């Protein structure tokens, strides 16, 4: 893959979408980190969402879409942190 030739408008849009999706998890992750509380968060939602993120990363590898892989993998790290904290709180 040649990154210079792979930069297309669609990749730029996908990258921006991925970055925004990832940034959306920062406030929740920071709040969980500060308060050490996940009481009001849904365990089922985070379990399903993390599963979806794993599949998105796998899909990204299958289609060789690095913007998708990088942003979803980073979101997975944030979301897994929240899920782990939720499981530890129980």
Image: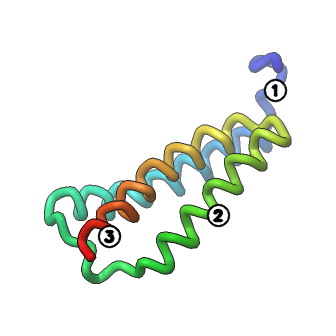
Crowd around label 3: few <14 · some 14–19 · many ≥20 (10 Å) = many
Are the two marked residues, 3 and 2, in contact with CB atoms closer than 8 angstroms? no
Q: Earlier in the sequence, mark 3 or mark 2?
A: 2
Residue position for label 3 = 86
Residue position for label 2 = 52
Compared with 70, 51 (above or below) is: below
Q: Quadrant of the N terminus?
A: top right
Q: Quadrant of the C terminus?
A: bottom left
* Image x and y of residue 14, in percent: 70, 47
Q: CA distance from mark 3 to mark 1?
A: 39 Å
Are the two marked residues, 3 and 1, in contact with CB atoms closer than 8 angstroms? no
The furthest residue to the left: 35
* Image x and y of residue 27, in percent: 31, 60
Which residue is drawn at the image coordinates 45% and 48% (left, top)?
A: 77
Which residue is drawn at the image coordinates 15% and 59% (left, top)?
A: 34
Which residue is drawn at the image coordinates 44% and 58% (left, top)?
A: 79
Q: Is residue 11 left or right of residue 37?
A: right
Q: Is residue 9 left or right of residue 42?
A: right
Q: CA distance from mark 3 to mark 2?
A: 18 Å
Q: Earlier in the sequence, mark 3 or mark 1?
A: 1
Q: CA distance from mark 2 to mark 1?
A: 26 Å
Crowd around label 2: few <14 · some 14–19 · many ≥20 (10 Å) = some
> Which is closer to the viewer, label 3 or label 2?
3
Tell which of 54 and 74 is nearer to you. 54
The local secondary structure at tag 3 comes to helix
Crowd around label 1: few <14 · some 14–19 · many ≥20 (10 Å) = few
The local secondary structure at tag 2 comes to helix
The local secondary structure at tag 1 comes to helix
User: Based on the displayed image, in which of its 4 quarters is residue 7 positioned?
Assistant: top right
Residue position for label 1 = 6
């Amino acid at each position: 893959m040649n990154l210079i030739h792979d930069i297309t408008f669609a990749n730029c849009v996908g990258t921006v979408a991925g970055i925004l999706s990832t940034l959306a998890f920062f406030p929740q992750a920071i709040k969980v980190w500060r308060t050490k509380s996940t009481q009001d968060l849904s365990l089922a939602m985070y379990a399903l969402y993390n599963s979806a993120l794993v599949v998105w990363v796998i899909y990204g590898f299958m289609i060789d879409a690095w913007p998708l892989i990088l942003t979803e993998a980073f979101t997975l790290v944030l979301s897994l942190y929240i899920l782990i904290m939720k499981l530890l709180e129980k």
